[in-house]
Amino acid sequence: MPGIGSRVRISFGSQTLVGIVIAIDSEHEIPLEKIKPVLQVLDETPLLDERLLVLYQFASSYYLYPPGLALQASLPRAFREGKPLQGRVLKMWQLSETGKTLEMESLARAPQQVRALSLLRSYEALSPAELSTLLSRPSGPILQALEEKGLICQVETSPGMTTDTTLKEAPLNFNAGQQAAFDAIRSASAGFNCFLLEGITGSGKTEIYLQLIHETLQRGKQALVLVPEISLTPQTIRRFSQRFQCRFESYHSGLSEIQRQDVWLAGRTGEADIIIGTRSSVFLPFDQLGLIIVDEEHDDSYKQQEGFRYNARDLAVWRARQLKIPLVLCSATPSLESLNNALQGRYQLLQLPERAGKATSPQLKLVDLRQQSTEEGFAPTVIAEIGKKLQSNEQVLVFLNRRGFSPVMLCEDCGWIAQCTRCEKSYTLHRQPAGLRCHHCDAARPLPQRCGECGSSRLNAQGMGTERTESFLAGRFPDFPVIRIDRDSTRRQDSLAQKLQQADSGIPCILVGTQMLAKGHHFPKVSLVVIMDADSGLFSADFRAHENLGQLLIQVAGRSGRSDKPGTVLIQTWHPEHPSLRKLLESGYGNFARSLIEERKSGQLPPSSRLVLLRAEASRQHLPMEFLSAVRKLLADMQASGVSLHGPMPSPMGKKAGRFRAQLMLMSVSRQKLHNTGSSLAVMLEQLPQARSVRWHIDVDPVDFS
Ligand code: ADP
Ligand code: ZN
Ligand code: ZN
């Protein structure tokens, strides 16, 4: 008989499928001849242990998503397909004697091999997954080539070996604030405890959790570190490699299927001592998990935005409670949800108000754009400041959250704007490669030579995107490289890593980019940050807009002056008197966020309440609203107490990729009541005839309201 959590083959209609046993019942009311036999038991030892199954069951129930699909969304593919679990010993690679003495020039025609060799030189030993992460490309073929040349060899390891807790480098001596935070976490009672470590960028949060992890390893336990995006945090990965002798692995979408499978199994057997991963790592199995860290806990990428719409941060908290272990949420700009939990005493709040080491906090200044003649979006004083920094061998970061050349293409004779008809939004003009592109549905079309309305050739690009800013700055400061970092310029595998490396080299340069620049990576040589436009977030209808703006500004600002040079942040705005902006600058993110919590409270918005969003879309305009109106009526008939209904209303982005969109919001101060209503809603939708005429989904604790 298969155990609970084992995979089995079953027949399902005319197909044979792989299933997972979630319960075994000896009594049933279904006639025996109607029950199908299990065709084959695939696992002797269950694939999923009970704790993991319970986590999946909770996630499926809380996010109102079918359990089978939830498993499908997060298990490595080989396991879903029923392939045997290969208890492969994870291979670690190191340089062979030949590799150690090789002159790199002899490999000049194989630059990836040279990079891999130099990484192995500085890290001593790496697993294929780690190397893939560091190279931002699959490491398999490169390792194979190097092995064939006899330049690398495998490190002898055996499964279940005891963890080597010695450190490669000595930990830093804590300052008083770090010590207090560390002691508070260490001395907390055994069992579940959730800490919110609110520390400004550069205050030494990472150093604290590195030392917590070390202490966890010494107790014979494993640690899980969640990060928003691995490719943006090579520095963090490097710090782990430089510090720990033990086995650490990373888990993210850039790995091959085989590597994902290996890391998954290494967690389960306990071979991997530390796993750093993105959102889906919250579902990794562990033999002896002893600590969870969620870095940059405010980051929206912890929330999956399609299919299984879970929030990895929130599931991490649930999992820590289930396993009775400590969890630390870290951020310079905590989410209002976590901050509110801390203020209410559910989490323990630990604060680090000062930068660690020698670095001083950056100075934030508003640049009033009114009554100034700007040049390509820059105030003259800002351009002068950029010039000064470059002349004194420093780096400048220019932040603009809009990729492409310009966001609007306009006919100067009749006012026509080139629009994507599938989304009813203006196309963005791109120069590299040239064309119009819709940033909502990715539609592309060639650059028009004439106006689509009046035929005039006086077409004009309006507004600034990163491409245009890049070309302006390159023309203005021809002696200095301009490095653009956005989704377009880093599409090619490896190009992001190369660009980051170029910046890390410390040469005076200008970095231009979108919010990719705001995440994770530190640019120690940047001493000036320019924020081109703070205003787009000030007047949005989205109730989370101010929170997001505050986080973004402070995160971008925090990239600068991380070493000995003090940083300056210039924020260009047309609304220097805006109360939110003033609050943020004058009293800091912490107070700004606390006052936003109060505002949300008076509006009964999250975190004072909870939301469930039902979204619907269809190619015919009236269908989504009709469907949602029918749902609203049924919900009203149910008279769910304590749950209020808002809408239906067309979504802010009312049409996307040719489909019309609308939403209905359920809100309650009681999580339980909302969950009950949401569950009935899910059942009801399966039976509602109108539901077949639209595409719909339920989003619990939504973060995207577009
Ligand atoms: P955070 O994670 O809060 O951004 P980090 O842990 O990355 O901060 O620390 C920022 C910088 O300060 C790093 O370069 C780190 O090496 C250094 N640092 C951290 N703690 C100390 C300390 N106690 N003494 C000296 N330098 C420190
Ligand atoms: Zn025209
Ligand atoms: Zn479009």
Image (cartoon, helix red, strand yellow):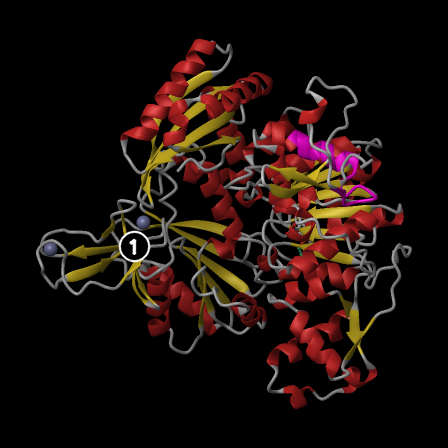
Q: On the rendering, which quadrant does ligand 2 occupy? A: bottom left
Question: For residue 47: magenta?
Answer: yes
Say whether residue 192 is left or right of residue 483.
right
Label 1 SS: loop
Which quadrant of the figure contains the C terminus? top left
Given the image, on which type of amino acid does mark 1 rest?
Pro
Q: Is residue 97 visible?
A: yes
Q: Residue at x 87, y 64 (%)?
A: 157
Q: Which residue is mark 1?
A: 407
- Location of residue 2 in the rendering, given as x and y in whole percent from the top left corner: 80, 37
Q: Residue at x 48, y 60 (%)?
A: 528
Q: Residue at x 41, y 27 (%)?
A: 691
Which quadrant of the figure contains the N terminus? top right
- In the image, residue 461 sits, relative to residue 540, either above or below, namely below
Between residues 234 and 200, which one lies in front from this camera angle? 234
- Location of residue 127 in the rendering, given as x and y in whole percent from the top left corner: 75, 65
Between residues 367 and 148, which one lies in front from this camera angle? 148
Start-end of magenta stretch: 40-58
- Location of residue 626 in the rendering, given as x and y in whole percent from the top left corner: 32, 24
Question: For residue 391: magenta?
Answer: no
Q: Is residue 521 visible?
A: no
